[in-house]
Image (cartoon, helix red, strand yellow):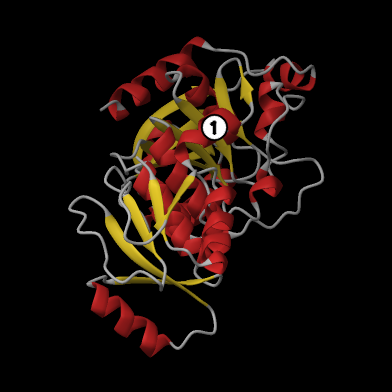
Amino acid sequence: MQVSLITDLGAIIEECARVAESIGIALKVLPPDSGGWQNSSLILLGEDVREAPAADRADRILVVLDGDEPNSAWKRAAHLGVEQLAVLPSAAEWLSQRMIAAVEPPVAPGTTVGVIAGCGGAGASVLSCALARRAGPNTVLVDADPLGGGLDLVLGAEQVPGPRWSDLSSSRGQLRPSTLSDALPRHEGLAILSWGRGDTLDLDPDVFDDFLAAAGQAFDLVIVDLPRHAPPQWTRRCHHVLLVAPARVRSAVAASQVAKRLSQSHPDVRLVVRETGPGGLDAQLLADSIGLGLAGSIRDDRGLSAAVDRGEGIPGGARLGRLVDRLLGEWAP
């Protein structure tokens, strides 16, 4: 798999090389009327090309520079028999996506699961971490809630080096699945994307969307801890959505409001009930009152907060483990 550029025009070579370098792809530059492009999965053509190569398995794109007359460029493309045009540098992001797709053809995406708290302190972060830790090695845990305190802290992985959300803020259209898996921080083999302590609380929806698209290509399972205020398009990116709510009346009222919002944008939202001891609501009754299917229930762990504060990560309770194993079994391909 390679990307070839056929041209002798220095300005075109410079712009295309800049795009390729930004995503770590080697660009093969060839003079017009030459060979060497036969193994290419994408062929870029400069305006000095008089005849486009007849490539059966490679897309061809005519590359021009900003300021060129659009009508003239499209006439040139039609003359070459090329149906795609990239105007650089304004189309750099689009061209980078085409290059990535050429060298890393899309595969069936992995399963993406969104976990959302029905109220503050519901236990969504604990469930997210438990699911990710129990899953197979090709799993990524994504902390999309800037107000959640950080999943890396829950796991005791805040000191692990590697990129955080702020490091991806300038990566629009430039996330390669093959390099994403190696770049992310790992704790006991689990890939994690969380927040830096000094990160802004705003997450660009486009950056989030690009990351999930790349993560779905790079990993078999993507577990996303979503904020309650997540936009509908975020939950729509998930194959499954779990809403976590404590078995208390006030928590149930708050969770029912979140459930209404989620159900408007996703057909598969289920409830996980955190049992809170004597006086708590029945899990099935709570699910019925909210109008969601019951995925299961978990119990309070009195030692959890202390273990997290000590940096020991989440303890593995037997009941939590059984629920996690059952859910992971349902999602297995």
Task: Classify mark 1: helix, strand or loop.
Answer: strand
Residue at 51%, 40% (x, y): give it: 224
- Answer yes or no: is residue 216 visible: yes
Q: Amino acid at mark 1?
A: Leu
In the rendered image, residue 161, in percent from the top left (x then y), is placed at 73, 28
Q: Residues within 10 Å of mark 1 (few under 14, many from 20)?
A: many
In the rendered image, residue 296, in percent from the top left (x then y), is placed at 39, 28
Residue at 38%, 82% (x, y): give it: 73
Residue farthest toward the right in the current orientation of the protein: 198
In this picture, residue 162 sits left or right of residue 228: right
In the rendered picture of this protein, how many numbered marks are placed on residues?
1
Mark 1 highlights which residue? 141
In the rendered image, residue 294, in percent from the top left (x then y), is placed at 35, 35
Which residue occupies the foreground of this view, 145 or 23?
Answer: 23
Quarter assignment of residue 262: bottom left
In this picture, residue 291 sits left or right of residue 202: left
Which residue occupies the foreground of this view, 72 or 134?
Answer: 72
Residue at 37%, 89% (x, y): give it: 71
- Answer yes or no: is residue 253 visible: no
Would you place residue 249 above or below residue 236 in this image? above
Would you place residue 108 above or below residue 320 in this image? below
Would you place residue 289 above or below residue 205 in this image? above
In this picture, residue 84 sits left or right of residue 246: left
In the rendered image, residue 38, in percent from the top left (x then y), is placed at 26, 46
Q: Locate the C terminus by quadrant.
A: top left
Q: Locate the N terminus by quadrant.
A: top left
